[in-house]
Amino acid sequence: MEVNGLPLHPLVVHAVVVLGPLVALTALVYAAVPRWRWLLRWPLVALALVVAAATLVAVDAGNDMVHDNPALQGLVEKHSEWGDLLETWALAFVAVAGLGAWALGGPSPLVSGAGARTTRGALGRVAAALLAVGAVGLLVLVFLAGESGAEAVWGGG
């Protein structure tokens, strides 16, 4: 897969590398700071969906690159494994973000009180914990997949 003669994989990977940590940090703040939840609820869900979609495209485009140039197989084996794990994690993170958006509430700074929601008891605490674990896992996997890809491209130095 190419865009204007450039391989799609490295283009889409940059979306994952930038937006993956952004959604992870958004999730951590959303889980820990109830007064910001009204503002972060939908950006959290939207970013999780975009990161999952970008990860799916990046993995598919990477597999196409290897298929078109089998000599890359040995060079990107570790990167491919981390990418596959990141893909699965990013898809699961969408579900966790959705659960968090539904289960976690907080006050609204608006005079009307619009956007204020109550947290759904123990399920809210579980959702907050899952968001934190999911966010940290996403950060780690983006780093590991990116590091192994950079090493495959530029060498271990």
Image (spheres, helix red, strand yellow):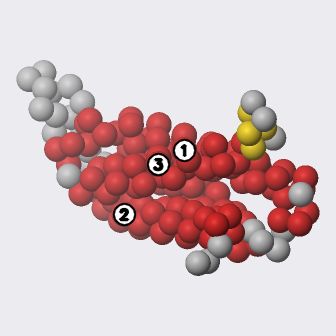
- Measure the alpha-carbon separation of dots 2 and 3: 19 Å
Residue farthest toward the bottom in the current orientation of the protein? 157
Q: Are marks 1 and 3 in contact (CB under 8 Å)?
A: yes
The residue singled out by tag 3 in the image is 18
The residue singled out by tag 2 in the image is 132
Name the N-terminal-most of marks 2 and 1.
1
Q: Which picture quadrant has residue 109?
A: top left
- Measure the alpha-carbon separation of dots 2 and 1: 22 Å
Residue 20 picture location, percent across and down: 48, 52
- Measure the alpha-carbon separation of dots 1 and 3: 5 Å
The residue singled out by tag 1 in the image is 15
Residue in the picture at 70% in, 48% down: 9
Q: Which picture quadrant has residue 106?
A: top left
Disc 2 crowd, CA 10 A, few/some/many (<14, 14-19, 20+): many
The mark tally for this picture is 3
Left/right placement of residue 48 relative to residue 109 reads: right
Residue in the picture at 24% in, 30% down: 115
- Amino acid type, label 1: Ala
- Residue 93 can be seen in this image: yes
Name the one closer to the observer, 38 or 102.
38
Name the one closer to the observer, 15 or 110.
15
